[in-house]
Amino acid sequence: METIELAAAHTDVSLWALFMQAGFIVKLVMIGLLGASVWTWAIVIDKYINYGRARRQFDQFEQVFWSGQSLEELYRSLSERPTGGLAAMFVAAMREWKKSFERGARSPIGLQMRIDRAMDVTLARESEQLEARLSSLATIGSAAPFVGLFGTVVGIMTSFQAIAGSKSTNLAVVAPGIAEALLATAIGLVAAIPAVIAYNKFSGDAGKLTARMEGFADEFSAILSRQIDEKLQPRAAAQ
Amino acid sequence: MNDLLKRSLVASAVLHALLLGWALVKLGAPEDFDMANSESLPVEFVPITDITQIQQGDKEAPVKEKAAPVPTKRPDTVQNAENVGDNDVDLKSAPKPIEKPSKTEAAAAPKQTEKPVPTPDEKSNDVKEVAKEETDVADPTPKPEPKPEEAKPVEKPAEKPPEEAKPEEPKPEEQAMPENVPVPAPKPKVEKPKQPEKKPEETKTAEAKAESKASDKKKAETKQDKAKSQATQKSDFNADEIADLLNKTDSQGGGAKRSSGEKAFGGKKTTGGEKLSQSELDGLRGQITDKWTYTAGLEGAEEVVIEVRFSLDESGNVVGDIEATATGGPPSTQQALLSAAKRAIRKATPFQGLPPEKYDTWKDVIASFTVADLGG
């Protein structure tokens, strides 16, 4: 009995060949997903370095802050170039304090409010910076599989159209088209999985850093409030 | 910040390029599935009857899984042979163990076997039974014995056979002449006037006659030989092996198809489509059990298994004795059931609904019954 030749001609099924055989839309999808993957990893690297650095700066600042060094001196050393969110908040608060106090603030309550405002603004800016581009990670993580699936569906669709044209249901004819189409989903998943993991990790990290800044803001606000009372009370008593 | 992002973007792009490069080089095309070892098996769908039907084998040999005829001794093969045997020529007859195989198909002269007297009597009786009613009116003398005596004197003056033929004559005459019953004398004598009125001959089984008559025209000697050979051939006439009669050589050697391996039970040749279907078999059993009057209350009747063996002729009547054996149960019950079984078979004959074309498969019936079959 004669064995039926399954594959008429050996088709190249390497990744590059699959990519090159793909149709225009599928190619576009694949390139887009590859770009998304590159972007995801760029953000991951950026955030990883950024958050590590921010954590180190926070530690450093807290160490200095609680070392008993006078606030005036600390402000003078940091005012030129504040490093990190905590330092930035400290500088913003001290600047507001100095401005109000030097001009001779009438109301301690008004001063307190202004300092809090200044720190809030800085906190918002800092946390925004921390969380910047995390949303794109979330977008890639949720959308990339769908984009990949879209590429696959289009690829399989064209595959079936080709099968209908060739009038052969031989698996060897069908297989390359489907493999090529599935490549799109694979790339989509490759982009999406790290994006989702990174998003979860970095949003958690950002939340922790923001909480730390908020805690510092409250603490520093309390310290400054006490200072305000101490400095304004004698003045009021003298009057 | 932006600076850092740009740098990480570059780093990410480089990372991807490296990974892709590695993947393109290392992953490449996956290895093709190895199809070399998967041999394709030709599958044929064979109806089950092809296997269950009669296979070529030996009728006396014990039953084995595969039917096989008696092994032949000669190793050389004859092409296109269909019948098993040691012969050079593919004869249809079954091999007989006596003589050596013949070299040619049709050259050898037939053996002149002297037939004992009783045989012709049976023959003539058989023939007469068929022909009697038509011939009795014309011919009041049915007895074969007087006729040869009458025929002899007539033939001798008419044709004058040589003396050597004489001693052999009586026997062929006795066999052949009984068929001549209505026309004893005139036939050999007056041949030309006879030919138009062939009626009396045609009423008989007259092939041998026609041939002998044709030869009569030429020589008496040839006629005697012919008659004799016809006679000897007829004496071991077997309807199943009628092809042997056409072949003038002896058929000891059988066919030319060689067979190896041990002989096993099977038919003379492989036949197709000749097995009784299950419904036909059940029908046969049903006809027996229908006539079986079962007497309830016999002790231990449930344990008795009755096996009956009998032969049928083509019209469904029992030929010969019904052999019945019983196993299990008390002997008295066995006896009662055995006689009941035989009665039932006698009553059920002639059996209906047996396909005549499959006669070979139901001419010998073996069936076993239990009380449960009788609905008892």
Image (cartoon, coloured by chain):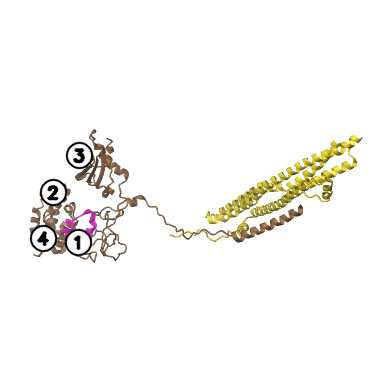
Q: CA distance from mark 4 to mark 1?
A: 28 Å
Q: Position of residue A151 (x, y in %)?
A: 63, 51
Q: Earlier in the sequence, mark 3 or mark 4?
A: 4
* Amino acid beneath label 3: Pro
Residues marked 1 and 3 touching at CB (< 8 Å)? no
* Amino acid beneath label 1: Ile
Taking the spot 87% from the left edge, 37% from the top edge, the residue there is A232
Relative to A131, say whether B215 is above or below.
below
Q: Which residue is mark 3?
A: B331
Q: Earlier in the sequence, mark 4 or mark 1?
A: 1
Q: Is residue A106 visible?
A: no
Q: Which residue is mark 2?
A: B138
User: Would residue B77 appear left or right of A172 to someone viewing this image?
Assistant: left
Q: Is residue A104 visible?
A: yes
**Marks 4, 1: nearer the viewer:** 1
Chain B, chosen colour in render: brown
Q: Position of residue B73 (x, y in %)?
A: 26, 63
Taking the spot 53% from the left edge, 56% from the top edge, the residue there is A172
